[in-house]
Image (cartoon, helix red, strand yellow):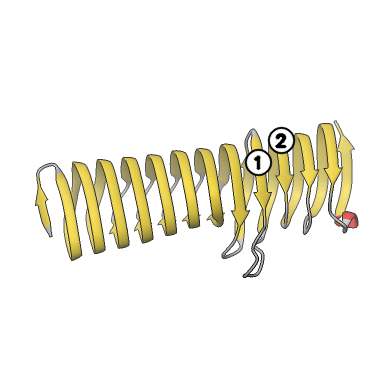
């Protein structure tokens, strides 16, 4: 482990105090004991932050847990991220799974994998290919929401959510109580209690009887 007043670098295994830094780099297994702020952070392997974390840019390859709120303008996740609080980002590139125990607010989510959110997901643009474990949230709201489940070598992913609300919505393999949007398209594998739409509604699913009620509002 090496460090100076402006950076942290942990190679192998190490522990370092929280604080404000320019760069944080963990390759191996690292623990940050407290709140941390940094311009750039890179975690490869396993990392634990024992407090809230704020980064301008953050890249994770492996597994990380944050004991508090997590904020990052640009966030790349290839693996598993656990946040014991809320997650806020401008852009999330996902190849894995994100778990938060509060809300998640992201301008753009793009990738494959999934998420488990105890609260609401607020997003401007969501383009997600469901994979890995069951995804879930109480509510997903945004402008453009596209949830697909395309996986050739694994069991297709699933999404469970109470409410989906947006301007343009496309869903696959989703179980929801209410889907409400301006333009709504339902793909295969969905079970939805109520669809409410303003301008257009299409159902591609062969099991259209799984959509219980459809209303134009």
Could you tell me which secondary element the residue under label 2 belongs to?
strand
Q: Which residue is drawn at the image coordinates 54% and 50% (left, top)?
A: 111
Q: Is residue 101 visible?
A: no
Which quadrant is home to the C terminus?
Answer: top right
Report which residue position mark 1 lands on.
145
Q: Residues within 10 Å of mark 1 (few under 14, many from 20)?
A: many
Report which residue position mark 2 lands on.
168
Q: Which mark is residue 134?
A: none
Q: Which residue is drawn at the image coordinates 69% and 50% (left, top)?
A: 162
Q: Is there CB contact under 8 Å for labels 2 and 1?
A: yes
Asked whether, in this view, residue 203 is left or right of residue 102, the answer is: right
Q: How many marks?
A: 2
Asked whether, in this view, residue 203 is left or right of residue 155, the answer is: right
Sequence-wise, the earlier of marks 2 and 1 is 1
Question: Could you say which is closer to the camera, residue 182 or residue 35?
Answer: 182
Which quadrant is home to the N terminus?
Answer: bottom left
Could you tell me which secondary element the residue under label 1 belongs to?
strand
Q: Residue furthest right?
A: 209
For residue 197, which quarter of the picture?
Answer: top right
Q: Which residue is drawn at the image coordinates 75% and 43% (left, top)?
A: 179
């Amino acid at each position: 482990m090496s460090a100076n007043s402006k950076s942290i670098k942990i190679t192998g295994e190490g522990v370092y105090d929280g604080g404000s830094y320019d760069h944080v780099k963990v390759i191996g297994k690292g623990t940050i004991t407290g709140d941390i702020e940094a311009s750039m952070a890179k975690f490869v392997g396993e990392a634990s932050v024992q407090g809230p974390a704020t980064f301008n840019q953050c890249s994770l390859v492996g597994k990380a847990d944050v004991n508090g709120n997590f904020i990052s303008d640009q966030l790349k996740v290839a693996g598993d991220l656990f946040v014991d609080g809320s997650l806020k980002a401008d852009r999330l590139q996902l190849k894995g799974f994100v778990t938060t125990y509060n809300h998640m607010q992201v301008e753009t989510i793009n990738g494959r994998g999934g998420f488990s959110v105890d609260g609401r997901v607020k997003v401007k643009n969501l383009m997600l290919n469901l994979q890995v474990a069951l995804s879930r949230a109480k509510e997903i709201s945004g402008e453009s929401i596209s949830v697909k489940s395309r996986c050739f070598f694994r069991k297709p992913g699933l999404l469970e959510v109470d409410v989906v609300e947006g301007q343009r919505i496309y869903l696959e393999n989703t179980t929801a109580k209410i889907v409400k949007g301006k333009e709504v398209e339902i793909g295969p594998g969905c079970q939805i209690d109520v669809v409410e739409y303003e301008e257009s509604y299409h159902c591609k699913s062969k099991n259209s009887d799984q959509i219980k009620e459809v209303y134009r509002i």
